[in-house]
Amino acid sequence: MKEMKVIAGGLILVLLILTGCTTTQKGAGIGAATGAVLGTIIGHQSGKEIEGAAIGAAVGGITGAAIGKKAEPAQPKEPKTTQ
């Protein structure tokens, strides 16, 4: 039960930190946090929680950043000015 409170507190902290970030940064942070949690759970089955968390965070962060970048609105191109 104590572990669940620590995980929940950590996720709340991550979400508060991500409040002022771009969509790409939010996606990377949320993906990394989710990947770390899932990696820890999967790694626990083989007795390698730390390795699972690290791999999960890396994969989740990369995936989350890619999804976040796709979700960002396109920036309008500035017209070329000639003088």
Image (spheres, grey):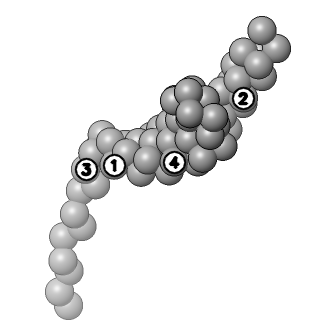
SS assignment at label 1? helix
Q: Is residue 22 shown left or right of residue 19?
A: left
- Nearer-N-terminus badge (2/3): 2
Residue drawn at the location 65% of the way across and 27% of the way down: 11
For label 2, the residue is 10
- Nearer-N-terminus badge (3/4): 4
Distance from Cα at disc 4 to Cα at disc 1:
17 Å
Q: Amino acid at mark 3?
A: Ala
Residue that sits furthest to the front in the current view: 46
For label 1, the residue is 66
Numbered mark located on residue 55 in the image: 4
- Nearer-N-terminus badge (2/4): 2
Residue drawn at the location 45% of the way across and 42% of the way down: 60
For label 3, the residue is 74
Crowd around label 3: few <14 · some 14–19 · many ≥20 (10 Å): few
- Nearer-N-terminus badge (4/1): 4
Does residue 10 appear in the picture of this structure?
yes
Most foreground residue, 78 or 6 = 6
Mark 3 or 4, which is nearer the eye? Answer: 4
Crowd around label 1: few <14 · some 14–19 · many ≥20 (10 Å): some
Q: Is residue 21 shown left or right of residue 2?
A: left
Q: Residues at badges 4 and 1 in contact (C-beta under 8 Å)?
A: no
